[in-house]
Image (cartoon, rainbow, N blue to C red):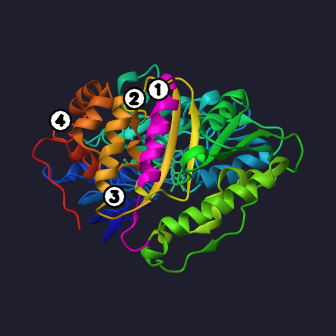
Amino acid sequence: MLLTGWGRYPTVTSRVTAPGNVDALTKELRAHPRSMRLIPRGAGRSYGDSALAEQVISSRFLDNFIALDAENLSISCGAGVSLAEILRLCVPQGLFPPVLPGTKHVSIGGAIAADIHGKNHHVDGTFCDHIESVSLVLASGELVHCSRTENSGLFHATCGGMGLTGIIVEARLKLTKVPGISINTESMAAANLEESLALLKEHNEKKYVVAWVDCLARGAALGRGIIHCGEHSGTGELRHRESSSIGVPFTTPGFLLNRATMATFNTLYFHRHSRAAGARQQHYDKFFFPLDSIRNWNRLYGSKGFMQYQFVLPDEAAENGLTEILEAVSRAGKGSFLAVLKRFGAANQNLLSFPRAGLTLTLDFKYETSLLPLLDELDAMVLAHGGRIYLAKDARMSEAVFKQSYPNWEAFKAIKDRVDPDGLFASMQSNRLGLSCADVGSSTT
Ligand SMILES: Cc1cc2nc3c(=O)[nH]c(=O)nc-3n(C[C@H](O)[C@H](O)[C@H](O)COP(=O)(O)OP(=O)(O)OC[C@H]3O[C@@H](n4cnc5c(N)ncnc54)[C@H](O)[C@@H]3O)c2cc1C
């Protein structure tokens, strides 16, 4: 079947299997021809090619196990369980996953493999910082358990390891007790990048902080944005409720997205939210997952798909680096709707984990071949400022850029080679980044 990531670029023809339980998975791996590489896949919400290969093992059916231990504030579940399912079970108990990304439709396996972050990284770290233990099936078919104290090298390679060490089948996650499900939010307008950065810094002690930046604004308005802060409120029923969603029924023509339409949208958004700035209360679903209210919104970028480009720059380089990058994007006129700016806290010990102390910016670009030179230019700026690019969003970074910016890649590869000596687990991304065996190729359309 034809498979893509959330960005709908690239497309690959894949053989997909979906074992219904761990025994079936173990048998499948033992019988699998060593020469045919494969990669695990969760909900397919990574944007690029990290969950793409000629053979894919879906964790969709590894979802038949979920056990909440409300007393010890933890939950154990199969890797195919989604964050939406965890919320459905936990919220009525006044419990919450400590880290949530911008969509609840990700699997636990995918959340661990990308070591995802939320709007509270500066306070609570990454998703894997709250993972107590992981069980995974290695290339040999052996089931192993790992944690910070048991097989710790494998644990730190698997958390953030993009599915390259084995197939996660189960995990135990710590939960947070919350007083209520509503979020007290506060929004503020910033007229330019300097003000946006100052507001992010000023509100750094708030639990959730995110800025939406107009990446097409120029001159004195470069980097203008709306900063949203949030804290759990003590009011509101502990009742799970998913917001209703509307769908994009078909792929819209890509030409509808051009500099003029995007700049108009961004300007309208900025002025509307500047006027509505202030404090209010929001349901958590709306606060954390605004994009989930539009199903298949990825179709809006046209039939060729789009690329999400997320990088982090260390604090000391952030203002200069962000100015340079936003100027280049604005000049090229290829910017996206709203860009997302967040502050990260310190890095953790996971070998390929993306977050590090500094500022992270996320930009969406409609895919077109003329985009690629701009992204190469941005890569050079990110590297020059000591930053790196998020693997869960990437579909085109070069091996050289990756190896220069992820200093622990060799330690990761040493562990991968030990647990997967034949290099069975390989994605299109790992082939491109030099993390698979040397002889592995990929097929793209
Ligand atoms: C609208 C939207 C908003 C997002 N917001 C954020 C955000 O705020 N913060 C953030 O960090 N990310 C964010 N993401 C990215 C997303 O959280 C990650 O890409 C996550 O990995 C997706 O999980 P998945 O289950 O869809 O995994 P997939 O996309 O299917 O796979 C992603 C990676 O995980 C590996 N993997 C999947 N399952 C397993 C398994 N069982 N065992 C081993 N490896 C496995 C795959 O091999 C692949 O390398 C967002 C994505 C979308 C679409």
The reply to whether the C-beta atoms of the residues labelled 4 and 2 are less than 8 Å apart is: no
Q: CA distance from mark 3 to mark 1?
A: 25 Å
Q: CA distance from mark 2 to mark 3?
A: 21 Å
Which residue lies under the disc numbered 1?
317
At 42% from the left and 22% from the top, the residue drawn is 150
Outermost residue toward the left? 439
**Whether residue 97 is situated above or below residue 201 in the rendered picture:** below
The one of 398 and 294 positioned closer to us in this rendering: 398
Q: Residue 285: x and y, percent?
A: 71, 55
Tell me the crowding category of disc 1: few under 14, some 14 to 19, or many 20 or more residues within 10 angstroms, Cα based: some
Q: Quadrant of the C terminus?
A: bottom left
At 22% from the left and 29% from the top, the residue drawn is 418
Q: Is residue 235 left or right of residue 440?
A: right
State yes or no: residue 179 in magenta: no
Q: Is residue 326 visible?
A: yes
The one of 331 and 187 positioned closer to us in this rendering: 331
For badge 4, the amino acid type reads Pro
Q: Nearer the viewer, mark 3 or mark 4?
A: 3
At 35% from the left and 28% from the top, the residue drawn is 154
Q: Nearer the viewer, mark 4 or mark 1?
A: 1
Q: CA distance from mark 4 to mark 1?
A: 39 Å
For badge 3, the amino acid type reads Leu
Q: How many marks?
A: 4
Which residue lies under the disc numbered 4?
421
Which residue lies under the disc numbered 3?
371
The magenta segment is 302-331
Q: CA distance from mark 4 to mark 2?
A: 35 Å
